[in-house]
Amino acid sequence: MKIAKIIGSVASVGASIVGFGSKALDFADHIIHRKEYAELEAQRKRRNRIIGITLGIVGGIVAVLLFPYKLVVEKNGDFEIRTLLLRIYRKSDEYDLPEGGSEEFDIEGAEDDEVIECELVEAED
């Protein structure tokens, strides 16, 4: 058991030494090839700037196309929203009033046996 702990601690120290040596070699490489790394960094910054500008333009175009320029809301709850790309609207269903001015009319989807009969009572003043 103690041998395993000793081997594990030696391996841990060895890994730390290797990690430090790797960092030291990277630092020395950066010092030696400083100009090449500076050029690569400048290219990366240019590429990121171009990508940022492109994404900004595309985002602006999408925002303009989807931003509502006309919004109409009527008293009965009907509304209409218009953008350059979309037209969203909701209109209430028109009821089919029978000819002759009768007050009875059919509502779509409601059958006669489902209708509750009610009696109109005039209010007293």
Image (cartoon, rainbow, N blue to C red):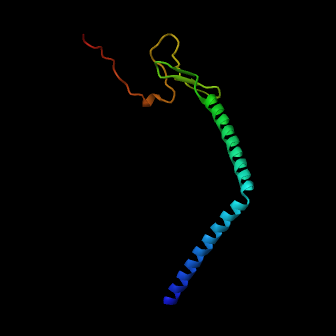
Picture coordinates of residue 89, whole percent (x, y): 57, 25
Residue 72 vs 7, above or below: the answer is: above
* Quadrant containing the C terminus in the rendered view: top left
Residue 18 vs 95, above or below: the answer is: below
Residue 119 vs 100, above or below: the answer is: below
Q: Residue at x 70, y 51 (%)?
A: 41
| Residue 91 in sight here | no
Please state which of residues 122 and 89 is positioned toward the viewer in this rendering: 89
Picture coordinates of residue 11, whole percent (x, y): 57, 80
Work out which residue is located at the far front of the displayed protein and give it.
Answer: 32
Answer left or right for 73 relative to 65: left
Answer left or right for 4 relative to 24: left
Picture coordinates of residue 103, whole percent (x, y): 44, 15
Work out which residue is located at the far left of the displayed protein and give it.
Answer: 125
Image-quadrant location for residue 83: top right
Image-quadrant location for residue 91: top right
Q: Residue at x 63, y 35 (%)?
A: 59
Q: Residue at x 68, y 64 (%)?
A: 28
Q: How many marks?
A: 0
Q: Residue at x 75, y 55 (%)?
A: 36
| Residue 42 in sight here | yes
Please state which of residues 13 and 71 is positioned toward the viewer in this rendering: 13
Please state which of residues 18 and 87 is positioned toward the viewer in this rendering: 18
